[in-house]
Structure formats: C-alpha cells, structure tokens
Amino acid sequence: MSNFSVPVRRSQRYQNLMSELKNSDCTILIDGPISTELDSRGVTMASGRGRRSPIDDREALIQVHMDYINAGSRVITTHTFGGNRLRLGDQFEELTLAAVECAVEARNRTRTEDSVVVAGSLAYHTALGRGRYDPNQDIESWARDINDLVALLKIGGVDVMLLEMVGGPLFTAPIISAVQDSRMPFWVGFSAFDDMDGNGLRVYDNASTPVSEALPGLIALSVDGDFGQFTNGGDSGVDIIGAMHCKPDPLGRVLEFIQLHGWSNTMFAYPDDVQKWDPSTSIGEAGNDPVEVFVDHCMKWRSEFPKCGILGACCGYSVRHIEALSNSI
C-alpha cells in the first residue's frame, strides 16, 4: 500500500502545462498514433518490428516523436501501448525503458525540455477485435504486470501516466489503483462504440458492458480512490479524463457522459480512423479521413465542450493531421 501522504510527483513542465489549461482558453495538442506512423515508414506491426522499434529501429521512433513535436504537439506518448510482460517476454523491461528514452531524446533534440510533456502509455488489451480486448490473463497476474509497467515508466522519467482505450471495469480498475499507488499524475482515456444491435454505447474493450455501467464507477475510483481516501480533497493524481479511440459521433457522446457522471474538470479528445483490423496479420485499414474532416471534428468538440482543452489523434491518422489542427488553432 502506498503512502498517500506523499505528494503526487508533478514535474515543473507538467505543472506549467496544467496551469496553462486552467488559467486560459488555450488548446494543447497531444500527438497522434505511433504505430500508424511507423507503419508508413516501413517499421510495421505486421512484421513484428513495430513493437521492437525502441531497440531495433530507435532512430525511426525518435523521428516520429520529433515530427509530432515539430507539428505542434505539447504532449508525446511513449511507444508502450499494449506492452506488458506477457507480450514482450524477457525484453519487457528493456523495451519499456527504451521507449521512454526515445521520447525523452526527441524532446531533447527539439530543445523543448521545458514545454513538452512525456506521457507513459498504459493500455491492457491485445488486439483481438472490437469488444474482445480483455487480457487472456487472470486478474491477479495482470495486476502484478501493470504495477511493473507503471514502475518502469516512472523510473524512465515520464511526466504523466496516460490510460488509453480503457473502460472494462475488471481490468481498468487495477491500472487506476496502480498509478494512484505510484504517486504519479494520470489521465484516463475512455473508448466506446455503438452496439450494432441498437443497445447504445458499449465500452470498446468489452462488448457486454454498457458505458452507463462502467464509467460512473471508474470515474469515482479515479477521483476518490479505492477506499474513498481522496474524497475530501486528497491528491488522487487524476488530473484529466477524456475520450479517445472512438469514431467522432460516439466520442462526443462519451464526453457528454463523462461530464454528466462526476467530472467537471479538464477533458481531452482524440478520435481514430481505423475502419478494419485483422488481428491475425496485425494489419489495419485506415479510412483516410481528409485533414479537413479531422480538424472540423476537433474544433467542434473544442467549441461544444469548453473543458476539452486537449486534442489529438489516434489510430489511422498521422503527423499531417496534427500539423493541420495546429495550424487551424
């Protein structure tokens, strides 16, 4: 059990970014997808190289991070999405720390050490298809693995933990508890999709769970802690909650739901553009949304949700989408 009297570790650059969001009408850009960009540069997920890029294709990964920074991103995410001991085996520690090093090196090379925040990406699923993302692992061993991942990201020097594409309570709750125990700030990115049978929004990682059942409890856990230890203003570390890896229509509805169920602070939004995904080949098919369509969606969310101060892109988009959004803002 962590000593919750210890303050959450917020770097000065992270504090500066949060102050900007709270004290002005500014919009901060997060980066776009890492794997999509690596794919376009020949470091493909299908070949297995994409996941090993922090070691085997280090310069390619650093360049992706640099390109996002130069396009206007103030938050860059580590290439650790979906990485865990079960998937990465004996090189879990090495690949995780190397991924953080690549992001930090990109920040150093662009001389943005004071202004760009590195977010440690945490996501628990393996890509089996929409609604089938719960790990093939028992909850106890999963919780141990996620605590190891959080510890490595903290050792590596990330500024904030970013929970991506979560929502299924069984496997999301241990991540929230792990980052609270680590005394690191964190953001939560919920994902959802419209059930094909007309039953409304379902969490992306578990098709049997409605958003209405999953999110209220997870928001409360993020804010109040496992035992209500943060209820009276204690520092839980949860700074921002948002919606990501959704198509534009459900994304806006997820933002609405978050606001209606206990969250009134800063939010973020970034959609995805993947139309099909083949888990047997690790190949996705992007919808190729024009940059204008992407920018229009983002500007709409910024207008309709004044608290939505962070915008970015997810699977299927690219550096050019972030650059276009930056120019529009």
Image (spheres, grey):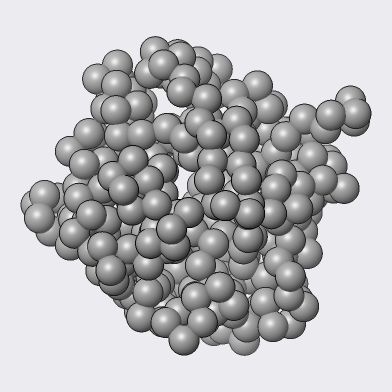
Please report the residue visible at 59 percent of the width from the left and 24 percent of the height from the top.
248
Between residue 47 and residue 61, name the one nearer to us: 47
Q: Position of residue 34 (x, y in %)?
A: 38, 48
In the picture, the quarter occupied by the N terminus is bottom right
Describe residue 153's horizontal placement relative to residue 308 as left or right.
left
Please report the residue visible at 60 percent of the width from the left and 49 percent of the height from the top.
165
Observer able to see residue 220: no
Please report the residue visible at 27 percent of the width from the left and 56 percent of the height from the top.
61
Between residue 223 and residue 287, name the one nearer to us: 287
Describe residue 285's horizontal placement relative to residue 196 as left or right.
left
Please report the residue visible at 68 percent of the width from the left and 61 percent of the height from the top.
172
Observer able to see residue 165: yes
Quadrant in the picture for residue 326 = top left
Q: Position of residue 157 (x, y in %)?
A: 30, 71
Describe residue 316's horizontal placement relative to residue 146 as left or right.
left
Can you say whether 221 is above or below 273 in the image? Answer: below
